[in-house]
Amino acid sequence: MLRKSGMPPLAASASFTGVPHRHERKPGRPVTTGKRSPGVPLSDASRRIRLGPSVLISLGWYASKIHRGIARFARQANWSLNISSMRSGRPPRGWRGDGIICSAYMDAAPDAAILDAGIPVVQIGNRDHPAVPRVASDNVAVGRMAAEYFLQRGFRRFAFFRRTGSIGETIRGEAFAARIREAGGKHSMHWLDWLAAARSLKLPDTDNVDMTWLARQIARLPRPVAIFAEYDDFAIEVLNACVAARIPVPEQAAVLGVDDDPLRCELAPILLSSIDDDLEMIGYEAAAMLAKRMRGETVPGAVLIPPRGVTTRLSTDILAIEHPLVASALRLIWDNYTRPIVAKQIAAEIPMSPRRLHDAFLKHVGHSISDEIIRKRLEHARHLLEETDKKTPEIAHLAGFTDHDRMGKVFRRVLGMTPGAWRDRFRDDAARK
């Protein structure tokens, strides 16, 4: 629904079976280095070295989380990884192996030498290929998560930085805009379209953004505004433009990126909030898919990995509620939801009649004060169930519920399952991945 005509589908209809190995090797054969005289036994160290399947990593770029996921699976599967063409994207001349993990940089097709290798191949990327299955981020889920995040913080004006026109960027931007439209009300959506501007100006190099242009475009946006970019790198360009235009972040422009790279986010001119799109799982799933193809098993045309959540840093750490007293009430809830508070206690702290506060909160936030308290507690409880081994009574206490029975009722009403079932489902999904 969100794709433009001609855009490849999010999940390929085709499935793929394993490709016979051109070079058959038996895993576990001892490796020797140099020549050995007949009758001379191998050293103990040589006996411990085993040669498993040889897999080439030919992505054409380096992403620590993705490579970490590949390496984690490789250790479990006793693979020998070849990273000599990690950045070039082309297999080394004369290489003979068992499988390749490649990437279609900027949505191009995999290198012809990879396709002609005659061995199983899996790609990480957004473009479907009739002969190569892929693993990628669930870009629709990423775009919708960004919109939900900003909507919950009370923003009414939104912008997307269109930087390259890639498939992933287009899907994320359109999913972001679609969720804003679904929210209804007085929400406005704007596009910072560098690609269109560069083309209209007939610039030969669209890769380098004109920061003067970007600062001028952001300065023209109605504020406060929530700005979303496809990746952390592009979000940092937005931050630099805000600094150049002397636009306060996050007070007048909140900025959100994707990848949650700690180094990039913490070295940005303003600490950058970012969506964790689970890049390590993308790498792990790509390796798992390749292993199935190497065994001759059928695999789906595409596996999409959902984002894990948003890491909030300074660039979005604000509530853009136009009603100051509603904003104060929302901040009180966020700061105190783990304590035994109720709506009446929040209302008592606000210099406004409870009835008028209720109506104003409903208008500006979209639900009641009680609903917001429950939403925050449920969000915290889900996180603890997914990330810790704590017992449900302790989690109920830490999340602010009166007891685990009350937490269970909320889980069943909102999520349709018990807290224990939620934890089991999350861990089952993680185990399958």
Image (cartoon, rainbow, N blue to C red):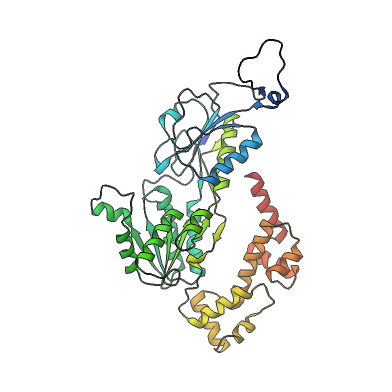
Question: Looking at the picture, does residue 119 appear above or below residue 417?
Answer: above
Res. 1 in view: no
Question: Looking at the picture, does residue 331 appear above or below residue 69?
Answer: below
Res. 138 in view: yes
Residue toward you, 188 or 82: 82
Residue 105 position in % (x across, y down): 42, 41
Residue toward you, 282 or 405: 282
**Residue 403 occupies quadrant:** bottom right
366 lies left or right of 186:
right
So how many labels did they put on this image?
0
Residue 327 position in % (x across, y down): 51, 78
- Residue situated furthest top in the rendering: 38
Residue 177 position in % (x across, y down): 42, 61
408 lies left or right of 295:
right
Question: In the rendered view of the protein, which quadrant contains the N terminus?
Answer: bottom left
For the point 57% across and 40% down, the residue is 70
Residue 370 position in % (x across, y down): 61, 77
For the point 72% across and 16% down, the residue is 41
Question: Looking at the picture, does residue 214 appear above or below residue 111?
Answer: below
Question: In the rendered view of the protein, which quadrant contains the C terminus?
Answer: top right
For the point 65% across and 14% down, the residue is 36
